[in-house]
Amino acid sequence: MRRLLVALSLLAAALWTAPASAQARSQLGPLCTTDTTPADQMVDACTKIIALKVFKGEQLATVYFWRAVGWNKKGDYAKVIADTTEAIRLQPSQAVYNLRGSAYYDKGDYDIAIADFDDALKQGPPSGIIFHNRGNAWRGKGDYTKAIADYDMSIKADPRSAFSFQNRGIAKEALGDLDGALADINQAIRLDPTLPQPLINRTAIWRAKGDLDRAISDGSEAIRLAKEKPPVNIMTPPNSVLISGYTHRALAYEAKGDYARAQDDYKATLAILASDAGSKANQATAKVRLSLVTDVSAPIPRDAPSPTTQPTAAPSPQQTDAAPSPAPAVRGMRMALIIGNGAYAHVKALPNPPNDARAVARSLRDIGFTVFEGVDLDRAAMQKMTRDFLRDAARAQVVVVYYAGHGVQVDGRNYLIPVDVELKPGASMTEAMIDMDTIMAGLDDQVRTNILIFDACRNNPMAQHAASAGTNRGIEGASGLAAPTSLGAGATLGAGTLIAFATAPGQVALDGEGANSPFSAALSRHIGTPGLEVQQMLTRVRAEVVSTTKSKQVPWSNSSLLGEVYLAEK
């Protein structure tokens, strides 16, 4: 970014020779257009200059650009986008497109960011910085091959770009090339030993390799460096490095079984103000993991992190094979959470989900998965089983989550329905349900593959109750589960995540006329096929469901898988 600022600095130097008040020329100008000016002073100075209404065209665009730089330092990306958009209207430039693209990237809007970086490259000569930033956006989308190609261009332009080596290493790690990733990140550390970010990413590689002591050591050094000398690069979101450092070290402590230190690091993560999408995703993970390592009887947290939790009720007697042996999980193991709810007490009962859950659980056990299985679970039992699974899955290499039963979307978020759910006037309906986002946050980790499968919302069980409940309009209007806007904005998802639904977003899945739903019948038949890659397996399931239901139901999936994943060995 530094080189892109040079041209704007030269323009700014000429800008202050234009007619203006003496105060604007001698004080406000340098405060506004010096990239080392503190954020609040920069924004204030630029705002006062704009209010003078002295400058127009390219000169005014320059002032808007520098105010956007100030907003960027503060992590206020909406205002960065507003000011850079105005600057582009007045006078497009490479630096302005790059800054706006970076703000969209930090918001998690990767497609728009890539479009801005493309426009930036059209505005001037090839820039290693812009190639690097576009590589970040490709990486955010999960297109690691294009990310690596852009990092190659950035390194070619500047062979001493530590961040480009680091981020190319992250992309290689995501593709499973741990040795290539380690080589790139080691080079980044050699180029600049004072940077905490490469050490944080090496922490993840050591965890993937199972070397937890090295992971903890690198995480500790990264945290020390981030505290000693906070990053000053205006393109680095405030507090993001420290949040990432604490999260990664906490995951390493948890994998080692040092829950006390993991708790401390998760609490430290949540105590820091997050501004960017990646940091918020890290905090969502920390929130769930903190609950899991703090008190085994505490409910999963919902809207706000809280170190103080209340015990939950004992498991429902309907729970079956709820938790295998409580022995610690082993790196490389494959685990599954299987729940089938049908015996609803207050909404329409479903005959098939228990059968569906048992069939899928049996198929997964046959191919070597350790299975947590529950049938007709009330909220307390469903909470406990989910907690137990998430806790043990922390060290699994591959996890599968399968749910059959009622599900519903509320304000775009998906909830799974325990059998004892009862809607009453004035009650908060979502508090009685299990939030799918919470499960996803608990599993979000770049060293694991996650397969989540939901045969839910076989009808809309809530519509007849929504009117009497009175306070919620989201349930009544949504007859199916919602498509995730992404797999969690800013989520790491480095090892790949696939989410599959029995039917398309907003549509109703069929319970079926036989012992199983059309989707689960097809899934249990194909999931254990040896040598069948998981996305090919779901394609076969989709084709069978479409045929069986005469096109009334079309299964749907969203994937960030990075390569071929086989649930059953070749």
Image: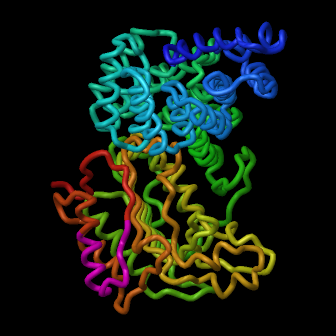
The reply to whether the magenta stretch includes residue 541 is yes
Residue 492 coordinates in the image, percent (x, y)? 46, 41
Residue at the limit of the structure toward the front, as seen here: 19
Residue 119 coordinates in the image, percent (x, y)? 43, 34
State whether residue 404 is above or below residue 75: below
Instruction: Note whether residue 469 is visible.
Output: yes
Q: Quadrant of residue 127?
A: top left
What residue range appears in magenta? 540-556
The reply to whether the magenta stretch includes residue 558 is no
In terms of depth relative to the viewer, which is nearer, 518 or 259? 518
Residue 548 coordinates in the image, percent (x, y)? 28, 85
Q: Is residue 237 left or right of residue 44?
A: left
Q: Is residue 176 left or right of residue 269?
A: left
| Image quadrant occupied by the C terminus | bottom left
Instruction: Note whether residue 275 is visible.
Output: no
The structure residue drawn at horizontal position 34% and vertical position 82%, both measured from the top left corner, is 518
Q: Quadrant of residue 537?
A: bottom left
State whether residue 402 is above or below residue 225: below
In terms of depth relative to the viewer, which is nearer, 562 or 366? 562
Residue 133 coordinates in the image, percent (x, y)? 44, 29
Q: Quadrant of residue 86?
A: top right
Q: Is residue 339 left or right of residue 232?
A: left
The structure residue drawn at horizontal position 54% and vertical position 39%, both measured from the top left corner, is 104
In terms of depth relative to the viewer, which is nearer, 348 or 154? 154
